[in-house]
Amino acid sequence: MTTILTDMATALATGDVKLIDLTHTLDPDFPVIVLPPEFGQCARFRMEEVSAYDHRGPAWKWHNLTLNEHTGTHFDAPIHWVSGKDVPNGAVDEIDPSVFVGPVVVIDCSAGAAQNDDFKLTPEIILEWEAEHGQIPADAWVLMRTDWSKRSGAAYLNMAEDGPHSPGPTPAAIELLLARDIRGFGTETVGTDAGQGAHYVPPYPAHYLLHGAGKFGLQCLRNLDKLPPTGAMLIAPPLKIKGGTGSPLRVMAMVQT
Amino acid sequence: MTDPLAPPPKKDPQKRTNTPVLPPAARSRAALGLAIMAGQGRFALQVCDDCQAIQYPPRDACHKCLSTDLPWRDVDPTAQLIAETTIRVSPEPYFRERMPWRMGAARLTNGPTLNCHIHGEVTRGDTVKMALKLDKAGQGVLIALPTEGSDTMQDDPILRAMSCDPKHRRILISDARSPLALALTEALLAAGAAHIFLGEPEDWRAWPERAEFECRDNVSLLPLDVTDTSSITRLASEIGGKTDILINTAQFTRPGTIMQNDTTFARDAMEVNTLGLMRLAQAFGPTMAARAQDGTNAAAALVHILSAQALAPDAGFGAYAASQAAARSLCNSLRAEFRPSGLRVLTLYTGPVEGDPWFQPLPPPKVTPKALARTLVSALIDGLEEATCGDIATDVFTRWQENALLLEREKTGGGA
């Protein structure tokens, strides 16, 4: 009997459907968001050896990990932000798992971001994209491609004395995406908001508006240049952390070749 | 004049590195006081509280009046070298490797005659300045020094073995982002250090002060974060064999009371201030200990800069003070663990540092990075185990030695 899933298995085996890894390696040197020092800080990824086939455990090697829910490539749940604190089922363990796999569209902002570190995703850009690819379908993930993930070291946060400079959406762009009833919004930068996102009204519009509306966030993504504008399927299940506001995760996309 | 110490040649890779051997270490309990005084750079002996007689060697009852009240007091170090001899044969491995060895007797102006090692610029009949030094076994020994030595007196082989002189040594400063790092780098280079390695945590976070280090000769910035074991083991595998002095400048400070601060900051404080030191010692310690008698630039010391709050907490710095106290305890354990190698652990106590943003609202006195660097370099040259910098740390350390419980009571608001 042929079913959708056996067709899928065949397509994966033959390469008709490819899996693209959109995840950065969890690495002690991978940047995390940096807040003013008097605030609590996002823990850097750390790995301590528990044993390595030695006197601490002769036949096995394992590590204890230290990290924040928002370290590395990670998922933001609605309760991450104050605007979403009362969203029903807003913690990672409460979210209906059916939303962890779903359609994804990619808006290519890489040319603009290459010219301008503070490149803004605006409603105009979204409407232009829709003119070409059709309206963003309801309940789809929307990813903002900037090729920012190809940066490394200090160029990634791109911190200056007036704060970080990296591309992100304007409040109006997020309003438009919410009007399309998207599932969530993802970026290649350290957060879903622009580096200078604190200066918008509301501050950090992606966080504030998306999570307030019960939508999800993905950040520190990579390989978005390998995704088509439409037609891919995103797999992004966060860890099931009780009361978790987010989670590091392996994000993958299925792409039909 | 002492022959100036030449920069050491590169190591001959066909020669086995000398295993550290120690001078005899057995001492009476009373004589351990010499090591305590030597570790602080004090020339102090027991002085009878009843008859004021200066005691030597250390003892349990006054040689003159049999009083047992013999506190350690600083005494005038002026003496005359009244006898000297040169030892050419010894059954002790430490001395056998260093023959011939001069020893003598010096009579203090105010007291007894002391058995002592002799600096090369001193001969019989000279007026000398006596000093208490820690030898390689970590025991207090006496040495007769010239009253006005030459510029190179520190290069005397007996004195050099008792010191951790930065001259010709390669030094790792664990955190280049510390407000102390630049002043330390400059002071150590001025003192003749061969090379300064600086650990750079989080090179993905830009810091403008980096430019100050980039333009210097004999200075290298290398990735190192004391909270990241993998970065420490990676660096130790690269430069562990040529790290002669390790200075831990990594600090995490967050003011806050125990009840109002949170355990996230407290955990960070422990990660950096306490476990950071432990990780550094684990990665660099064994190689440094194995190289503790490796010629002119033998590994000499592990230095940890402690807040004076390690001795007694200030109100409002609960978790920070706890991490400092824990680090102080680690330093003591490391002293015991490094004892068989002769590698020294120097703890430098400081008060709030000028330019450290976490101490910005505190009133003076504060310690300037330059003053701290000066103190640290002299403490290394003098071969100390404990030193203080600034009025606050010196005051706290003195009061702690006099009466630790009273100090704690005063600092925690229990005073009248």
Image (cartoon, coloured by chain):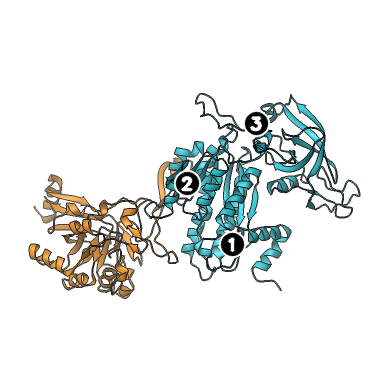
Chain colours: A orange, B cyan
Q: Secondary structure at mark 2?
A: strand
- Label 2 Cα neighbours within 10 Å, binned few <14 / some 14-19 / many ≥20: many
Residue B340, quarter of picture? top right
Q: Residue A46: x percent and y percent?
A: 41, 52
Residue underneath mark 1: B366
Cα–Cα gap, marks 3 and 2: 31 Å
Chain where mark 3 sits: B
* A143 vs B51: above or below: below
Question: Between disc 3 and disc 2, whose residue precedes?
Answer: 3
Q: Nearer the viewer, residue A94 or B39?
A: B39
Q: Nearer the viewer, residue B98 or A4?
A: B98
On screen, residue A73 versus residue B382, left or right, reads left
- Label 3 Cα neighbours within 10 Å, binned few <14 / some 14-19 / many ≥20: few
Residue B130, quarter of picture? top right
On screen, residue A12 versus residue B385, left or right, reads left
**Type of the residue with mark 1:** Lys
Q: Nearer the viewer, mark 2 or mark 1?
A: 1
Q: Residue A141: x percent and y percent?
A: 19, 63
Chain where mark 1 sits: B
* Residue B331 at least partly seen: no
* B221 vs A251: above or below: above
Residue underneath mark 2: B198
